[in-house]
Structures are given as C-alpha cells and as structure tokens.
Image: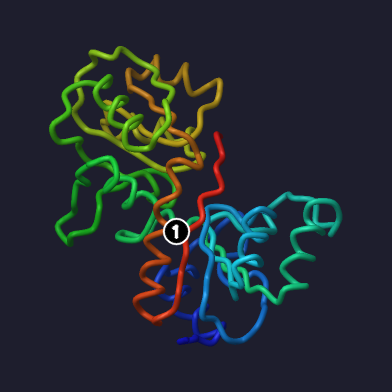
Amino acid sequence: MSKVDSHVLASWLDDTLQAARFKDYCPNGLQVEGRSGIGHIIAGVTASEALLRVAVERGADAVLVHHGWMWRNEDRRVIGTRRARMALALKNDLNLYAYHLPLDAHPALGNNAQLARVLGLAPALRDDGSPQTCGPDNLVWLGEAPGLQTLGQLGERVAQRLGRQPLVVGDPDQPLARVAWCTGGAQGMIGDAADAGASAYITGEVSESTVHMARETGVGFIAAGHHATERYGVQALGQAVAERFGITVEFVDIDNPA
C-alpha cells in the first residue's frame, strides 16, 4: 500500500488551499499529529466522535474534515466531549487535518465551487477566470442558475439535488436573475448578496433576522442546511489527495439535519 508522510501531506494541503492567507476562527491544517505514514484517510464534514470511531473501525491513519477542533471562544479545557474526542484520536494514533475557510473558498475544490457543480449553478467569472465574489474574504460567489426561471424552481432544484427540503423565503414566482451563494453558516452575508445585485441567495443556515433582511431587500433566501451544503468540498479534496499520493480516501457522511 502506498503511504505519504503526515507532514508532507500537511504541506501539500496547506499549499493547495492557501491556508496561510486566511484569518480564521480555528487553526487550519494538521490539528492532531498521529502516526507518520498515511495510507488510508476517512474524510467527513465534522471531526465528531462518530466519524473518529469509523476511522478507528476501518483502520484509517488520518481524518480529513471541514470542521475541526479548537474554535475561537470555545472552552479550552480538555473535558467532556472534547476529552472523549481527543482521547480517541491520541489512543489510536490518528492524524486530524481540518480546513475551514480555505476549503470554503478554493476555486475548484472548495465548498462553494462544489455546491455550484451539484446545483447546476454557473459562476460569473472575472477576466482572469476567477469567480466573481463579494462579502468578507470574498466568500460569497455570484452567478446564474441556467434553465431556472423562478425562486420556486431554484428551491425545488435544491431539494432534489441535496436530498432535503430547504427553507425558502420569498415569492416562489419571483424571477431569477443574479444568484449568490455561500455554504454553511453564512446567513449574515445576505446584505452583501443584496448589495451585489443578487435576486436570490443560497446558504446553509437561517437566523431570525435573516428573514426580515430577505423581505426588506427583496432577495429570495434559501437555507439549504449547513451540513447539506458542505458535504462536497471535502469529497473533492479527498479525491485530489487520493490521486496525488495514490492512497485510499473514503468519504463518510455522518448525517446531520442542521
């Protein structure tokens, strides 16, 4: 079986995702150091205890996720669920790689790019071929939904492709023009989408204030699920790792309705 050194893999991931350019809410990269040789990775959205147990059961050497550990303003004590997760990783010599904003933003492997692929969205491109974006860290993507005419049709597409019924705020017959999207918990960026001229905005979560913003700006709003919108970037990244290093990468979807 082919194997890659854990630090060689970390360096490649850091470089590929340009992790150093982001000021994030958590550390990106190798969060827990395990065994040196990696031939089998379990990939998933979140480094939950359930995902770690799958990695142990399948004899994996590492876990690769979007949502890792050690978030800003989190209780830093190693107690409770944190202790259980860390003990599981350390006891079984697992490496943990986690990439948050860098994985959201990558122009090909990222969550926004992959959600566009899954939903059939067409990103608008700048002259240099990069996606047109707006919002903090340019995380909100802009484009169109070819073949779809209304907000209701877009909501139906989201439900069909993601396998869950989204929350749709707005008139189903509202015409679609420019569409904006940002995966995960980006409901607070609806104002940026409105300022960029979007007629509809897709993200994962909704807050009470989001509904008022959607109604008052006229932007059709779709909350499609944090987990549901962020399953695809880590899959694409895992596939890239497998192809680059000739190792096994399995994606495991630990269901989450949020």
- Amino acid under disc 1: Val
User: Can you say whether 91 is above or below 102 in the image?
Assistant: below
Residue beneath the point at 27% across and 27% down = 154
Question: Crowdedness of circle 1 by 10 Å Cα count: few (<14), some, many (20+)?
Answer: many
Residue 254 spot, x, y in % from top left: 56, 48
Q: Quadrant of residue 58?
A: bottom right
Numbered disc 1: secondary structure: helix
Q: Quadrant of the C terminus?
A: top right
Left or right? Give the position of 139 relative to 4. left
Q: Residue furthest front?
A: 57
Q: Position of residue 51 (x, y in %)?
A: 62, 56
Q: Residue at x 43, y 69 (%)?
A: 18
Kindly indicate the quadrant of the structure image that contains residue 236: bottom left
Q: Position of residue 168 (x, y in %)?
A: 39, 21
Residue highlighted by disc 1: 234
Query: Is residue 135 depicted above or below 174 in this figure?
Result: below
What residue do we see at 49% from left, 86% from top?
Answer: 3
| Foreground residue among 250 and 23 | 250
